[in-house]
Amino acid sequence: MLLMLVAFTLFGQFLVDPKDAYPLSVPTKRAPSWEYPFGTDFYGRDLMAAMVVGMWQTAFIGVVAGGIGTFIGVVLGFISAYFGGWVDASIRTVCQILTPIPVMLIQVVVAGSLDKRSVTIFTMALIVVMLAWMGPTLVIRSQVLTMKERQFVSVAKLSGVSDMGIIFKEILPNLLPFVAAAFVGQIFLAVFAAFYLAVLGLGPLREPLLGNIIWLAQSQGAFFNGWWWWPIIPSLGMILILGSLALINMGLDELSNPRIRKSE
């Protein structure tokens, strides 16, 4: 399913003009047809072009925010678990304090306090990544705590391998499935956060993010005016994106967690 979405985004660039994803580019309020397969909206945007561009932008937010959150989480998780002591206590305490805080509320407050004209796709990625590092930090920390007690790590220490050598050559390669699962999970959360912020009208309004399209459709009363295609098509696109990422994340969790495999 995700491959189909990727193919649509890649090959869609050759089927549409990206400029048509922005206002005043095509005739307004056209129902789906051969000329406009996904129809057009109230603002004169080709919704197929908007979907192609919007999916690229969604992927950018997901990969950037997910990558930053995962990288910070992996670094903090390794430092906390491997070196222990006051460093571990400090990182663990910060995570315990911040974890109960509703991340969605913070994201909404921060996004709502910004000037709408200054919000860009990259700004959205930075807003979404706030506190996203906590989950990967705790997951990687728990795995490193377990792994550093294994025999191959003890042998490496006795052989005179440095701490950095043990981390990068012995522990990290064995944690790659967990890192991959954390990365996909962070992409899912980033895409979802960008979606609900945009649906609330807190995204870069000129950009054709799928959430923006839905928010604009709602603000213009698309359903009441009979423009059903305007909100439905981007909603289906977002459902497919989130569903695909969720399935991939579940598969990686099963691969990296033997307890899940045993339970089955």
Image: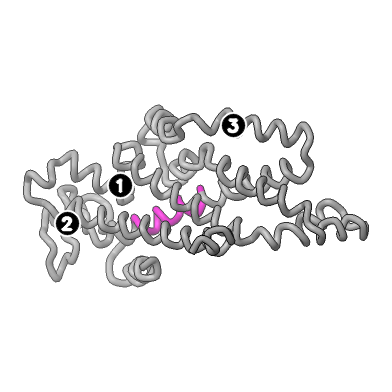
Compared across the picture, whether 89 is left or right of 69 comes to: right
Q: Is residue 114 visible?
A: no
Disc sitting over residue 211 in the figure: 1
Distance between mark 3 and mark 1 Cα atoms: 32 Å
Residue 133: image x %, image y %? 57, 42
Q: Is residue 251 visible?
A: yes
Q: Which residue is mark 3?
A: 96
Magenta stretch: dominant secondary structure: helix
Q: Which residue is mark 2?
A: 40
Residue 116: image x %, image y %? 35, 34
- The quarter of the picture where the N terminus appears is bottom left
Viewer-nearest residue: 148 or 235: 148
In this rendering, the answer to whether 196 lies above or below 97 is: below
Q: SS for tag 1?
A: helix
Compared across the picture, whether 117 is left or right of 142 comes to: left
Amino acid type indicated by mark 2 = Thr
Please tell me which residue is depicted at 41% across the width and 50% down the height of the picture: 191
Amino acid type indicated by mark 1 = Gly
Q: Among all residues in the image, which is located at the extreme left?
A: 225
Amino acid type indicated by mark 3 = Gln
Q: Earlier in the sequence, mark 1 or mark 2?
A: 2
Distance between mark 3 and mark 2 Cα atoms: 48 Å
Viewer-nearest residue: 39 or 179: 179
